[in-house]
Image (cartoon, helix red, strand yellow):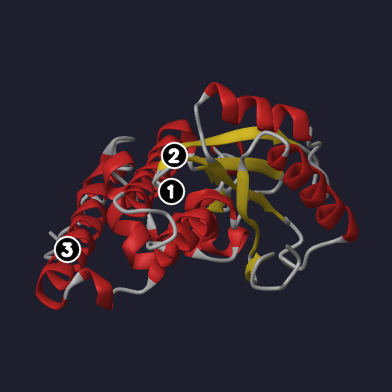
């Protein structure tokens, strides 16, 4: 009789066996999230790079899975953290990531809406700062507000900040939206709206999606027409601000009004 024992017969691994590996991967991701949170608490949020700050926020709408590729894809697509937050829900949903197996995945409507909501929160906080005092004495806060509102808009917007007799903000109103290089403006409508609001003065604001805030010849002519229409009704125009990614141009500071 042979003393050699036969090898045991190996039965096929059950189809559900790979699930045993999943908890390890899940545990690794969970550990990364907790380490990132610990680092944010210990060192402060301001020490985190932009993609990790985005990761922290994405944890809410992406309770499972690795969100680092999503954060990096967003920054690569839009170019900066400010541009990510200023992007529309529709544009955010065009962002795709690819996993190790080559499968693509979108960020989803919930994540896109969360990011857009974060930008709106920042805009409203900025507006509160600009509205606490007279606009003239809180000029730095006003410039910060218009940049946050318009710096990364892909289409031209024409807005008017209507002010009361103490130069405090009554309303920031979008008068018109246009194309990548033009938004129609109607001076009579601008002035008519000022009368409806009992405004005494205004600041004109629009953006240049090209990034360069330098006033164009049509910008200068349009401003002149609004000033003349306002003057006829004893209304004043304090300034015309053009917002671009490269900064904010002030007609008053440029000597154009």
Give me the residue at 62% from left, 41% from top: 159
**129 left or right, relative to 92:** left
- Please indicate, yes or no, whether residue 173 appears anywhere in the rendered image: yes
For mark 3, does the 10 Å Cα neighbourhood hold few (<14), some (14 to 19), or many (20 or more) residues?
Answer: some
Label 1 or label 3, whichever lies nearer to me, is 1
Q: Secondary structure beneath disc 2?
A: loop
Q: Indicate the secondary structure of the residue bearing disc 3.
A: helix
Q: What is the secondary structure assignment of the residue under circle 1?
A: loop
Mark 1 or mark 3: whose residue is earlier in sequence: 3
The answer to whether 170 is drawn above or below residue 153 in the figure is: above
Image coordinates for residue 88, horizontal then vertical, percent: 57, 40
The residue at which mark 2 appears reads as 164
Residue placed under numbered mark 3 in the picture: 37
Q: CA distance from mark 1 to mark 3?
A: 44 Å
The reply to whether discs 1 and 2 touch (Cβ–Cβ < 8 Å) is yes
Q: Give x and y (percent) for residue 47.
A: 26, 78
Instruction: Give the Cα separation between the discs numbered 2 and 3.
Output: 46 Å
Q: Considering depth in this image, is 155 or 61 the residue closer to the camera?
A: 155
**108 or 199, which lies in front?**
199
Position in image of residue 69 (x %, y %): 46, 59
**Residue drawn at point x = 25 percent, y = 57 percent:** 29
User: Which residue is found at the position 67% from the left and 33% from the top?
Assistant: 233
Quadrant of the rendered structure where residue 16 is? top left
Q: Identify the disc placed on residue 167.
A: 1
Label 2 vs 3, first from the N-terminus: 3
């Amino acid at each position: 009789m042979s003393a050699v024992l036969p090898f045991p017969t190996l039965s096929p691994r059950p189809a559900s066996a790979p699930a045993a590996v999943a908890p390890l991967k899940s545990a690794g991701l969970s550990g990364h999230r907790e380490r990132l949170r610990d680092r944010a608490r210990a060192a402060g949020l301001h020490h985190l790079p932009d993609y990790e700050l985005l990761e922290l926020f994405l944890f809410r709408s992406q309770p499972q899975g690795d969100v680092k590729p999503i954060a990096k894809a967003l920054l690569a697509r839009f170019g900066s953290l400010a541009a990510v937050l200023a992007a529309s829900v529709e544009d955010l949903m065009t962002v795709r990531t690819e996993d190790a197996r080559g499968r693509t995945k979108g960020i989803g409507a919930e994540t896109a809406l969360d990011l857009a909501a974060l930008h709106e929160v920042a805009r409203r906080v900025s507006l509160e700062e600009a509205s606490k005092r007279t606009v003239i004495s809180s000029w730095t806060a006003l410039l910060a507000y218009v940049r946050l509102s318009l710096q990364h808009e892909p289409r031209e917007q024409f807005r008017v900040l209507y002010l009361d007799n103490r130069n405090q903000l009554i309303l920031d109103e979008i008068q018109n939206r246009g194309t990548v290089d033009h938004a129609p403006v109607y001076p009579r409508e601008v002035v008519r709206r000022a009368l409806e609001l009992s405004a005494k003065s205004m600041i004109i604001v629009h953006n240049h999606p090209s990034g360069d805030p330098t006033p164009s010849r049509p910008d200068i002519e349009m401003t002149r027409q609004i000033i003349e229409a306002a003057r006829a009704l004893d209304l004043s125009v304090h300034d015309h601000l053009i917002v671009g990614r490269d900064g904010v141009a002030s007609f008053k500071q440029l000597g154009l009004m």
